Image: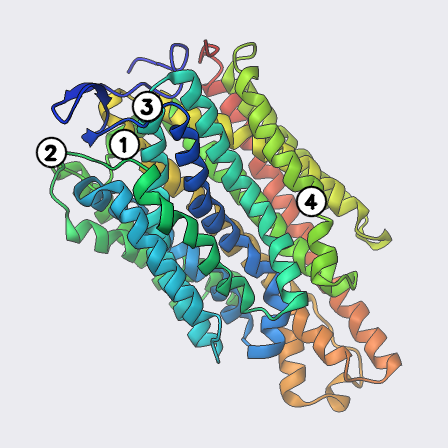
Amino acid sequence: MGNSFASSTPVTPTFTQSPAAPGRPVAGGSFRAPKRGQDWLALALLMFPVLLVAVDNTALTFALPAIAGSLEPTGVQLLWIVDAYPLVLAGLLVAMGSFGDRIGRRRLLLIGSFGFAAVSAATAFAPSAEWLITGRAALGFFGAMLMPSTLSLIRNIFPDPNRRRLAIAIWAAGFSGGAALGPIFGGWLVEHFWWGAILLVAVPIMLPILALGPVLIPESRDPRPGTVDVASIALSLLTMVPLVYGIKALATEGFGAVPAAVTGLGLLMGYAFVRRQKRLRSPLLDMSLFGNRIFSTAITANVLALFSFNGFILFLAQHLQLLEGRRPTEAGISMIPALLATVVAGLLVVPLVRRVRPGFVVAGGLSLSATGYFIVAFGDHSGGPALLLGALLVLALGVGAAETISNDMILGSVPPEKSGAAAAISETGYEIGSLLGTAILGSILTASYQRNLVLPEGVSAAGTGEGTAQARETLAGAMELAHTLPAPLADALTSAARAAFESGVHMTASIALVLMAGAAALVAVVLRGVPKAT
């Protein structure tokens, strides 16, 4: 398969003439291109759902201590509060992209925006952990309507390759920047209001796109879409849910019959999903794209970049608040340099790929991510948060560079008629990377904490049975219990909890270090022949 990265990245869609708009280029079906200047206004509107989806992935991370104190979830429930949203979102992205082709991508975007705002308002007042998990899953359903629409619309709004390359870089920077902005935004809201404000704020954020979207964002759809295969949608969900649950169970409970059976079910459904896609004339997910080495390697880089970033934020948020004693706002503000680094790195590498081969740019970004995790894995965290925040800055630079160019290469490595499917897979990769970062690294971190925590003598007798159980489950539970104990016991419990938590941080950082280094080497070898952009 020919490579188109050097000539126009991403690939320029095949244009046809629209009877309704003589002389106007049409891409991906019925579409009227916006006037020059209106395209950037449309992009600005599209950034609202992109930022919101990205922020929602990480904002709740900084609210976990407040949620733990308010709803008293178990360790597994605490992880599901974070993961239910990206799990459902990732499982439905490709399916929702197919629906957008049929009913119109702008229409699907507006439906998703309204539903996301309504569910956010209802979930903000959740009285229990179960309610919150259900609400997060519903947000994932409507969030899946937002992401496939944004990138597809951007491709059509910007027919000029150079302007489109910059627009996609802004889109990628918005996603990664939103992931970093989430803890800052969430921390400020938790400190000044309550944890539910993080969800409630989606309502005013969605108002601009609901009010101005029908005017500024042009509609586009595929005039000849394939049929929707319901069985494929079901199989995709039956793959994702059991796999993530199995990973959590294996990490927290160890190897057992139930976790192994659930994981096996997910793998079996995944196998059935792949076989079905290969047989269908109009597959939900075009598996032939993965036969392109550039495409599959860039997808891997994209997933691992987000994997490392979200896994890092998960434990850093808890470390800053629970072990360093920072208020949510203070902890969030300390991440601002990383937020800026992610956005700046994503924009700076756009002209860089005209001078340096894109494979080496992506490999360099992944190497920076590996360096960040090296600092965490082998550093001493007892001297304050400076070391971890410095590692986050290095990691953010790497993620911003790697994910922007890898996403560009994903779209540029396939023929024009496959660009829509490539965009959907790219967006799914974003969510899977975020999901796996919290699910795998979060589960390993929780399991390591639980296995290494040794409660000081006298803590069980001084505290309540429920409080002791919560302390064994999560770091937040241990800190809550410490506040109720006399000073000597509180100090002893805090030290024990810190040691148990840090053992998990070193373990997860070491795993991420190996993954990032391996991904950097893979990209450098496989993508070294991809030419510079022009």
Q: Residues within 10 Å of mark 3 (few under 14, many from 20)?
A: some
Which amino acid does the dot numbered 3 rest on? Asn
Q: Callout 2: helix, strand or loop?
A: loop
| Distance from the alpha carbon under mark 2 to that under mark 4 | 45 Å
Looking at marks 3 and 4 on the same chain, the residue that comes earlier in the sequence is marked by 3
For the residue pair 99 and 487, the one nearer the viewer reads as 99
Which amino acid does the dot numbered 2 rest on? Arg
Looking at marks 4 and 1 on the same chain, the residue that comes earlier in the sequence is marked by 4
> Which mark is in front, 3 or 1?
1
Q: Callout 1: helix, strand or loop?
A: helix
| Distance from the alpha carbon under mark 3 to that under mark 4 | 38 Å
399 over 265 or under it: above or below: above
| Distance from the alpha carbon under mark 2 to that under mark 1 | 13 Å
- Tell me where residue 121 appears, x and y as whole percent: 43, 68
| Distance from the alpha carbon under mark 3 to that under mark 2 | 25 Å
* Side of 174 where 393 appears, left or right: right
- Disc marking residue 336: 4
Which amino acid does the dot numbered 1 rest on? Gly
Q: Which residue is mark 1?
A: 420
For the residue pair 164 and 208, the one nearer the viewer reads as 208
Who's the residue at 65% across and 59% down the image?
187
Which amino acid does the dot numbered 4 rest on? Ile
- Tell me where residue 413 appears, x and y as whole percent: 35, 21
Q: Which residue is mark 3?
A: 292
> Which mark is in front, 3 or 4?
4
Task: Please tell me in which quadrant of the rendered image residue 161 appears.
Answer: top left
Which part of the image, by quadrant, shows the N terminus?
top left
Q: Residues within 10 Å of mark 1 (few under 14, many from 20)?
A: many
| Distance from the alpha carbon under mark 4 to that under mark 1 | 34 Å
Task: Please tell me in which quadrant of the rendered image residue 137 appears.
Answer: bottom left
Q: Which residue is mark 2?
A: 224
